Amino acid sequence: MLKSLRLAALVSVITLTPFGFAGAFAGPLKVVASFSIIEDFAKNVGGDRIEVTTLVGPDGDAHVYEPKPADAMAMNKADVVLVNGLHFEGFLQRLVEASATKASIVELTKGVEPIKMKEEFAEGEAEGGHADHHHGDIDPHAFQSIANAKIYVKNIADAFCAADKDGCDTYKANAEAYTQKLTETDKDVKATIASIPEDKRIIITSHDAFGYFEHEYGLAFLAPEGISTEAEASAADVAALIKQVKEDKASAVFVENITNARLIEQIASETGLKVGGTLYSDALSPADGPASTYIDMMHHNVATIKGAIVGS
């Protein structure tokens, strides 16, 4: 009933306008980004040729976000809508239908090789545990690998070229320049991880957002919650994790910017580990924070991990 009322509220604010990609644009390309990391990618590719509206802003959690009427209006007026895909944005389908948008909905994970969620969470789902039912067995956090971030950037450039042919050369040049910066960041991240002893590369975070980071860079992440923050960890989940931490000798525990620190503090207390700081998982920090861009986020996360384990 509540979702129906929200949907009705979204629909009530929409005024349909004619739309088409053909011909020149009178102003900047109107872009909607589903969350802050995608916004940063879009700005790096689009520059001053685009105007971006972001649905889930800094420190926001797209897993549990509830769309507002203003979001439906922005979607309706958009030329391009950029989303993660892989069911990361649980609100997306409702919002698309409510907004009656004619924009291209571009899933930026197209071309990414998805990885499965960790086995313990897949089993939890089958047994009615805490695994997230929206995502199935696929991990949607593909942006946590810089190699995948490059795929996002290419998909954005292609989408902008399709919507604004006059700006295509600019979009491609911007994407190429930004991709070079991502390549340098990737080298820095790998060098930092290499400086952490292999037997100290097990760490704990709030929810299972770092599977692609683990796959790409060789750290092991344990988490009491599954792929989504939507489902809370049970007492049994937490007890099992604490037991695993003690057996595997995890090196550090971290809070995430989008989750409540209470659970991590409990785990830290019961395992004797110190909270090593805040990692940015599904959202950037505000502009005055340490992770206000994707590149800053990757540098901050890896430096925070290294600092907690071996010192800065």
Image: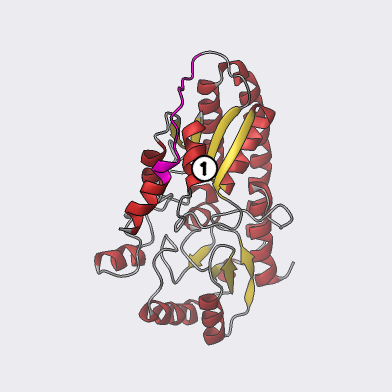
The local secondary structure at tag 1 comes to helix
- In front here: 226 or 29? 29
Q: Main secondary structure of the magenta part?
A: loop
Say if 270 sits above or below 286 in the image.
Answer: below
Which residue of the protein is positioned furthest toward the left in this rendering? 127
Give the residue at x 49% y 35%.
81
Which residue of the protein is positioned furthest toward the top in this rendering? 23
How many marks the image carries: the answer is: 1
State which quarter of the image contains the N terminus: bottom left
Which residue of the protein is positioned furthest toward the front in this rendering? 12
Q: Which residues are magenta?
A: 10-22
- In front here: 88 or 113? 88
| Residue 66 x %, y % | 45, 54
State which quarter of the image contains the C terminus: bottom right
| Residue 272 x %, y % | 58, 85
Q: Magenta segment: does it hold 21? A: yes
Give the residue at x 58% y 48%.
36
Q: Residues within 10 Å of mark 1 (few under 14, many from 20)?
A: many
The answer to whether residue 38 is visible is no
| Residue 271 x %, y % | 53, 84
Give the residue at x 52% y 44%.
70
Is 5 left, or right, of 206 in this rendering? left
Is 108 left, or right, of 93 in this rendering? right
- Please name the colour scheme applied to the rendered image: secondary structure
Is 112 left, or right, of 195 in this rendering? left
| Residue 43 x %, y % | 64, 36
Q: Which residue is mark 1?
A: 148
Give the residue at x 42% y 78%.
238
- In front here: 307 or 141? 141
Amino acid type of the residue tagged 1 in the rendering: Asn
Q: Magenta segment: does it hold 131? A: no
